[in-house]
Amino acid sequence: MSATPPTQRHLRVLCLEDSPSDAEQIRRVLVAAGYDLELDLAAERGRFEELLAGHPYDVILADYRLAGFDARAALELATAACPRTPFVCVSAAIADEIAAELLKGGAVEVVLKERLGRLPIAVERAIAAKARQGEPPPAPDARGERFRGRLLDRAPAADASGQPGGPSPGGGRRA
């Protein structure tokens, strides 16, 4: 019996990461998930732009913060150079507001490095999103629900009133 998973799929990845150990961990996680991985690594903006102009990729994975460069700028470059290539931010730490900005700006997912086991799921979603690009866009309510769903696990707990931390003073609704 072969050590190669029977569901192995070819995946061409552009990875923007300045930590060789983090890039290797990303590679290991995707290979363990059954991908026949072809990974091009960029550690800085110039190399990222060079690779974007080259061969097409199935997905772009980008660390949030690099020296003199970040995922927001990388997303803008990627959107201009290859708008149909899905973009996933993979970061050690990222503020909720920045994650929301990336998602609104076109990133498919944001994955924390401490939860790198979720990366194959994010990649599958990214590939599915790419496949759906030829379909009509979902209704605005459905798009909003998907966005809220991505941030729910980071939201504060709500009490029975549905408000974080309970109802506002005076019993009125919070603005």
Image (cartoon, helix red, strand yellow):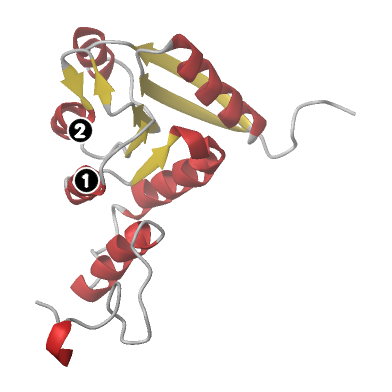
Q: CA distance from mark 1 to mark 2?
A: 8 Å
Q: Determine the residue positioned at 36% across, 64% down.
A: 149
Residue receiving disc 1: 106
Looking at the image, which residue sits at the far front?
169
Disc 2 secondary structure class:
helix
Q: Which of the 4 image quadrants contains residue 111?
A: top left
Disc 1 secondary structure class:
loop
Mark 1: amino acid = Gly
Instruction: Indicate which disc residue 16 carries.
Output: none
Q: State which quarter of the image contains the N terminus.
A: top right
Q: State which quarter of the image contains the C terminus.
A: bottom left
Q: Is residue 17 placed above or below 82 in the rendered structure?
A: above
Residue receiving disc 2: 75
Q: Is residue 97 left or right of residue 39?
A: left
Relative image position of residue 72 (x, y in whole percent):
17, 33
Looking at the image, which residue sits at the far right?
1
Q: Determine the residue positioned at 13% across, 79% down.
A: 174
Q: Which of the 4 image quadrants contains residue 71?
A: top left
CB under 8 Å between discs 1 and 2: yes
What is the tally of numbered marks visible in this picture? 2
Residue 92 visible somewhere in the drawing: yes
User: Nearer the N terminus, badge 1 or badge 2?
Assistant: 2
Q: Residues within 10 Å of mark 1 (few under 14, many from 20)?
A: some
Q: Determine the residue positioned at 41% across, 13% down.
A: 19
Q: Is residue 45 placed above or below 132 in the rendered structure?
A: above
Relative image position of residue 95 (x, y in whole percent):
25, 42
Q: Is residue 7 left or right of residue 18?
A: right
Mark 2: amino acid = Leu
Q: Is residue 99 left or right of residue 88?
A: left
Q: Nearer the viewer, residue 18 or 9?
A: 18
Relative image position of residue 91 (x, y in whole percent):
36, 32
Q: Determine the residue positioned at 16% across, 14% down.
A: 68
